[in-house]
Image (tube, grey):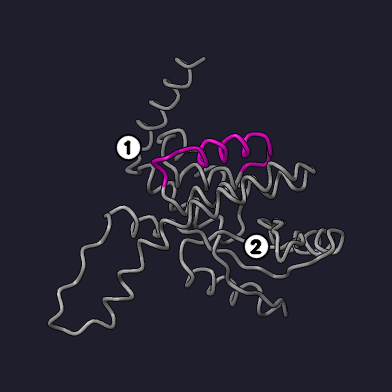
Amino acid sequence: MRIGKSILRACIGGALLLAGRTAASELDSARLYLNTGDMEKARGHAESAYLADPGNPAVKLIYAQTLTDGSDAKKLYEELAADPGAPDSLRAAACGRLAGAYRLAGDSARASDMEKRAMAALSPSASALAPKDTERTAPANTARPAAPSAEKPEARVDTVFALQVGSYADYANAKSRQEQLMKLFDHVRMQDAMVDGRTVYRVRIGSFTTREEAQAYGRRNMKNRGIGFSIVRE
């Protein structure tokens, strides 16, 4: 079975090269179609990117978001959450999605564990960015402190943004809103979170690499329908 997968990946990689495309370009196409709500095309490009570069954390995250099989998506999220070499923001995003899945399945213990892991993954990035605040207020003749590492700022490149259209204390209300929006958009999901010791259910749309992309999509596809939204980081 492993030999078969290796051969398939080699064939995919060769085909992409012959077509003048790379795993990175396939990933960009997948993100583009994901942002416009075309899940079928997004899934096709994401799958090509994953077969060509299965170890890429960004590829794993986008590919998992396009899968219709929850168990396959969960497996990818678990791999990404456990990958110490993945950017902090991507590991946190994977942990957050796993937390939501576990909570909806009634497994509060595992959901809480994943939420803690998500917060722990984001903490180093926050501290790594602190010196930049100091730089903005430092006099011109003051030597700037060296950045802790080159990896931390780069981790923010793959940060995922989404459009949040509502946050509900009642699961049934959130589910109803999700189902309404699914008639208009393809990539609609519900995530739960703990706020002041209580569970809230958030309904979100899309997956964007920048805040500007999210804002543009919302104005183009939601504002004219009278659907309010806020841009959130995942």
The image position of residue 166, as x and y in percent, is: 73, 70
The numbered disc on residue 205 is: 2
Task: Decide whether the magenta segment is chiefly helix, strand or loop.
Answer: helix
Vertical order, 69 against 182 (above or below): above
What residue is shown at x 31% (from left), y 52% (from top)?
151
Q: What stretch is highlighted in magenta?
A: 67-86
Q: Quarter-wise, where is residue 193 in the image?
A: bottom right
Vertical order, 221 against 51 (above or below): below
What residue is shown at x 46% (from left), y 66% (from top)?
210
Q: In this view, does 53 lie to the left or right of 169?
A: left
The image position of residue 41, as x and y in percent, is: 56, 48
Q: Is residue 154 left or right of residue 78?
A: left
The image position of residue 209, as x and y in percent, is: 47, 61
For numbered disc 1, what is the local secondary structure?
A: helix
What's the residue type where badge 2 is placed? Answer: Ile
Vertical order, 182 against 164 (above or below): above
Callout 1: few (<14), some (14-19), or many (20+) C-alpha neighbours within 10 Å? Answer: few
- Check if residue 24 falls in the magenta segment: no
For numbered disc 2, what is the local secondary structure?
A: strand
Closest to the camera, between mark 2 and mark 1, is: 2
- Check if residue 81 falls in the magenta segment: yes
The numbered disc on residue 17 is: 1
Vertical order, 221 against 116 (above or below): below
- Comparing 128 with 47, the one in front is 128
Instruction: Estimate the spatial distance between the alpha carbons at disc 2 and disc 1, rounded to whole Å.
Output: 33 Å
What's the residue type where badge 1 is placed? Answer: Leu
